Image (cartoon, rainbow, N blue to C red):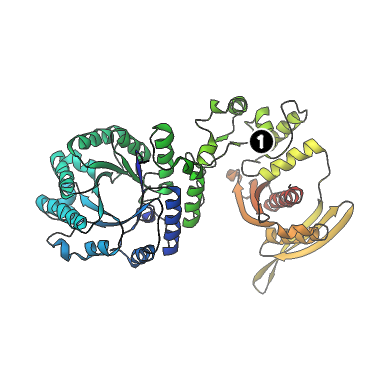
Amino acid sequence: MKPEVEIYDTTLRDGSQGEGINFSVMDKLRIAERLDAFGVHYIEGGWPGSNPKDIEFFEQAKGKKFKNARLAAFGATRRKGVRVEDDSQVRLLIEAETPVVTIVGKTSLLHVKKVLQTTPDENLAMIGDTIRYLKDNGKFVIYDAEHSFDGHADAPEYALATWQAAEKAGADFVVLCDTNGGRLPAEIARITSLARGKLNAKIGIHTHDDIGLGVANALAALEAGAVHVQGTINGYGERTGNCNLTSVIPNVALKLGKTCVPRASLAKLKELSQFVDEIANFRHNPRLPWVGSAAFSHKGGQHVNAIQKVARSYEHIDPAVVGNRRTVLISDLAGRSNIVMKAQELGFKVDNDTPELKTILGKIKDLEHKGFEFEAAEGSLALLIRKALKHEDPPFKVEGYETTVRRDRSISVCQATIKVLVKGEAAHTVAEGDGPVNALDSALRAALMRFYPQVKNIQLTDYKVRILDSATGTRARTRVLIESSNGREEWGTVGVDDNIIEASLGALTDSMEYGLLKK
């Protein structure tokens, strides 16, 4: 069934212009394949006239068969004073052999006169000549009208003339662009409605997020009659980014009630968002709407108590619809419902009548007051709950330790000694490391290996230090968060102390203990 709103992804072109993003050709091909499988309608691969990487991408893409999407090459209108047939950049758009070509042209007289340094009539000819040439070569042409809203504000009649020139030349879509990302939804809706009344061509929208309204402006245009929306996964793009498709897509499908990507794809939205972040080598933003890990997290006791009874009391949709899940956070704001739901999530059999709940809640609030936090340390939280419920001895206990640092030929050598007790039997080991914490980690592992060979599978994947009261200077209390993995699962643990080594040991011992007890 033909969608009511078409999704045009420009992650590989506009998104790659974001700060810190540098996709390889293979990265772009992998993302394109995933976007196609997800069900977007257009994938903008890049600008074949701008750099060798994009030229290579289109060469390799010629051998790919896309199931759902049509690949688009991006370029600009012909240069001023040059016949379109003689423009090398336009020729490269043809040679890319994509079914779709998207070209950008000027709407704003400011850009026509000051940037292109040409006449208004020549700009109109540049738009028309390029589109006609591409259509004559069998291309589906999307015209991106750059600075549509700024240009219309300055010279509305000329802005309309540029859009009409594109339509007259045969453009399949005229896409209105809020290129500077500074317009408000009401203005976007008004101009989109005006364009729809003046043009027969289908209208699209392309927004940027410079004032935080990229998604809101795109939705305003869709409600005003646009049927095509351009954006990037996770909002990558120039400056503060482009319209975020991971927000637009579920808003279109679930809030506006319009068809876009296949319904079954919505459940893969978070997975797609994380995949693109991984390729870009970015940490996933937990606060992204819809797909972030915090999007359906609940911390306040009143909120958790309510969702325990009726989920929709504090959730606008079922998180699973977009591939996400509910998370209950534990802190000094927690109530009994937080503990029950979090403990159940961690695999413990508890309910509101479990007698240990009061003890667990009191312990958590006391530790939070001292600087602990369990939102990213579910391993430490699970151990706390387990000890309260099961009243069992831990698998090991650290009886004592010592760390030393000495200088050896201008090289710093760190050494740690540790004594571990396991079921009444002691192990005493010494190890060196790149620092006191690394040496302590090595010594602890060596001591435990004698009793628990599976410790070799537990690896630290991240180590973070947070100073909690910096006003006290070097006496400040320190929080250490450690991420660990056994190759299949990951967990976080926390330690807090005035002594950074003591705080680190607390997080390290929790990591090992949780890894040994985890089922």
Say which quarter of the image contains residue 178.
top left
Q: Nearer the viewer, residue 233 or 507?
A: 233
Dot 1 amino acid type: Lys
Residue 226 in view, yes or no: yes
Q: Residue reaching furthest front?
A: 1
Image coords of residue 514 (percent x, y) = 73, 48
Q: Nearer the viewer, residue 414 or 258?
A: 258
Which residue does the numbered mark 1 point to in the structure image? 342
Neighbor class of circle 1 (other Cα within 10 Å; few <14, some 14-19, many 20+) is many
Q: Is residue 53 found left or right of 400 in the rendered image? A: left
Image coords of residue 71 (percent x, y) = 34, 55
Image coords of residue 411 (percent x, y) = 65, 71
Q: Residue at x 40, y 61 (%)?
A: 64
Q: Is residue 417 found left or right of 121 in the rendered image? A: right
The N terminus: image quadrant: top left
Q: Residue at x 54, y 40 (%)?
A: 324
- Does 189 sit above or below residue 449? above
Q: Nearer the viewer, residue 11 or 254?
A: 254
Q: Residue reaching furthest bottom?
A: 409
